Image: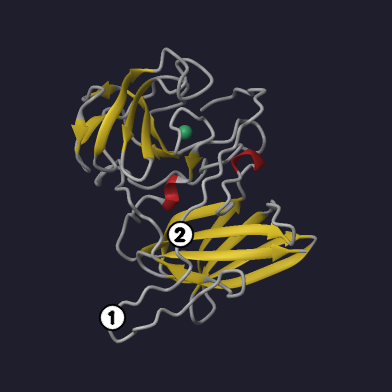
């Protein structure tokens, strides 16, 4: 993992998403969608945009590594993490996350996709519809070449530790818009299908009354109907340079259920939300 400290002036490209804030009708018996505004509701359940498949398939580890999530700075010791890790053994098959065209396959000897050469090591970049791109880094083996058309789920390479990597893992990124813009990444967790049918995702936007992103360390607890804590996650808001406009925390693979969000920001904040299978829960918290 990188220990570089680039002195870049980031150019942040904010592309507004067309993420719907309404609950889609699930049957013809509900002719009018119930509008849900995350700025006034405690939370909104949306379809999200889970357009991508997992790049690692079971029985290998298809879960995002929680100790080094998207946007993490490793307690301020690293450049913000632009992707997510799938920690797996050398040689684990890596699969295309969606249909698309390979636009790069090989070692990143020229710094195009990051400010540093040989940063991603053996790298594959695939262009998909919707101006989406996926990047697969640190590979030990590459099975495709630039120009190849690939299908979702097609094997494209193998996990390695080439480039700036500690231990073998797949570093996976999703970019939107200008693929060569190192700041065009989005949180892969909000674009990947949950890894299990009864999992959903959560996106939190924390801002103040002037729409300025606010930072806090968030505690997320899954709580049963009887009040028992079933799961616990500590979430760090995105680094300011990764202020993507839509959320500043995003996490997938949460078991469906009731969750309690708490954090301290001047005062103590608490919000109860629900996560549903295959859905994205959108939460907006305006702090004082
Ligand atoms: Zn990584």
The x and y percentages for residue 60 are 28, 42
Q: Residues within 10 Å of mark 1 (few under 14, many from 20)?
A: few
Foreground of the two, 29 or 46: 29
Quick one: quadrant of the C terminus? bottom right
The x and y percentages for residue 202 are 49, 61
Foreground of the two, 165 or 22: 22
In this picture, is 121 found above or below 187? above
The x and y percentages for residue 203 are 52, 58
Corner quadrant of residue 47: bottom left
Q: Which residue is mark 2?
A: 19
Q: Secondary structure at mark 1?
A: loop
Measured in 3D between alpha carbons, the distance from the residue under mark 1 to the one under mark 2, in whole angstroms, is 21 Å
Q: Is mark 2 within 8 Å of ligand 1?
A: no
- Say which residue appears at 22% left-offset and 25% top-offset: 144
- Say which residue appears at 59% left-offset and 24% top-offset: 3
Name which of mark 1 and mark 2 comes first in the sequence.
Answer: 2
Q: Residues within 10 Å of mark 2 (few under 14, many from 20)?
A: few
Residue 92 in view here: no
- Say which residue appears at 56% left-offset and 69% top-offset: 38
The x and y percentages for residue 124 are 32, 27
In this picture, is 125 found above or below 265? above
Q: Which residue is mark 1?
A: 27
Corner quadrant of residue 32: bottom left
């Amino acid at each position: 993992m990188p220990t570089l400290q680039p002195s870049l002036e980031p150019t942040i490209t904010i592309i507004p998403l067309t993420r719907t804030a309404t609950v889609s009708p699930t049957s013809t018996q509900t002719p009018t969608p119930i509008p849900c505004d995350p700025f006034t509701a405690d939370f909104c359940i949306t379809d999200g945009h889970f357009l991508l498949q997992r790049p690692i398939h079971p029985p290998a580890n298809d879960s995002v590594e929680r100790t080094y999530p998207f946007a993490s700075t490793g307690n301020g010791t690293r450049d913000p993490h632009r992707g997510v890790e799938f920690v797996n053994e050398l040689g684990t098959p890596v699969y295309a996350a969606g249909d698309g065209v390979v636009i790069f396959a090989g070692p990143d000897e020229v710094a195009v996709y990051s400010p540093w050469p040989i940063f991603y090591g053996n790298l594959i970049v695939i262009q998909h519809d919707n101006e989406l791109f996926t990047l697969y880094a640190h590979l030990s083996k590459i099975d495709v070449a630039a120009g190849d058309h690939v299908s979702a789920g097609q094997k494209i390479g193998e996990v390695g530790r080439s480039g700036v990597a500690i231990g073998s893992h797949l570093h996976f990124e999703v970019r939107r818009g200008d693929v060569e813009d190192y700041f065009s990444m989005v949180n892969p967790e909000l674009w990947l299908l949950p890894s299990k049918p009864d999992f959903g995702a959560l996106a939190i936007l924390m801002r103040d009354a002037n729409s300025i992103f606010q930072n806090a360390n968030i505690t997320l607890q899954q709580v049963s109907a009887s009040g028992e804590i079933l799961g616990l996650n500590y979430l760090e808001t995105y680094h300011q340079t990764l202020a993507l406009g839509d959320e500043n925390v995003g996490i997938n693979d949460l078991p469906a259920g009731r969750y309690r969000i708490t954090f301290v920001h001047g005062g103590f904040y608490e919000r109860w939300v629900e996560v549903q299978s295959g859905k994205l829960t959108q939460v907006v918290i305006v702090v004082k």
